[in-house]
Amino acid sequence: ALGALAMQKVMLERALSIQEQRYGGEHYEVARTLANLAHVDGALGDLAAQQALLERVRRMSDLFNMTPTVAAASSSGLA
C-alpha cells in the first residue's frame, strides 16, 4: 500500500510541475492536483506537507470564487 501511495505522490508531483509550467501557479487544475497531492501526503502520514498544500488550495479557492462545498472537496482531496 505504501508503495502505491509513494508512486501516486511521484506522479502527482510530476503532473504539478507540468501544470505549473503550462498554466502558472494559480490555476484551477493546479489547485485540483495540489488537493490530490495533499490527500496522498496525509495518507503517507506527512501531515505538515498536507497542511501546507491544503492552505495553498484554500488561498487559491478564494481566487476562483469556489463555493464552500467545492473548496471543502478540494481541501479533502475529493476533487
Image (cartoon, rainbow, N blue to C red):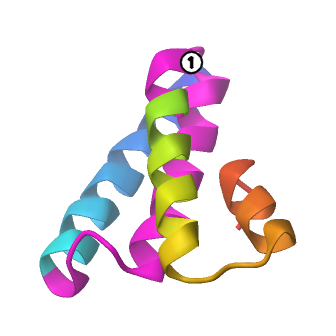
Q: Secondary structure at mark 1?
A: helix
Most distant residue in the left direction? 21
The correct choice, above or below, for 16 with respect to 10 in the image is: below
Q: Which residue is labeled 1 in the image?
A: 47
Residue at 44% in and 26% down: 49
Q: Amino acid at mark 1?
A: Leu
Q: Seen in the image, is 18 located left or right of residue 55?
A: left
Residue segment shown in magenta: 22-50
Q: Is residue 46 visible?
A: no
Q: Is residue 42 visible?
A: yes
Based on the picture, tell me whether residue 42 belongs to the magenta stretch. yes
Q: Position of residue 75 (x, y in %)?
A: 68, 51
Q: Seen in the image, is 72 located left or right of residue 79?
A: right
Residue at 75% in and 48% down: 76
The correct choice, above or below, for 57 with respect to 48 in the image is: below
Magenta stretch, overall SS: helix
Q: Quadrant of the C terminus?
A: bottom right
Q: Nearer the viewer, residue 3 or 27?
A: 27
Q: Position of residue 31 (x, y in %)?
A: 48, 67
Q: Position of residue 72 (x, y in %)?
A: 79, 57
Residue at 48% in and 80% down: 28
The correct choice, above or below, for 27 with respect to 74 in the image is: below
The number of numbered discs placed on residues in the rendered structure image is 1
Q: Position of residue 33 (x, y in %)?
A: 48, 63
Q: Quadrant of the N terminus?
A: top right
Report which quarter residue 11 is drawn in: bottom left
Q: Nearer the viewer, residue 34 or 4?
A: 34
Residue at 40% in and 55% down: 12
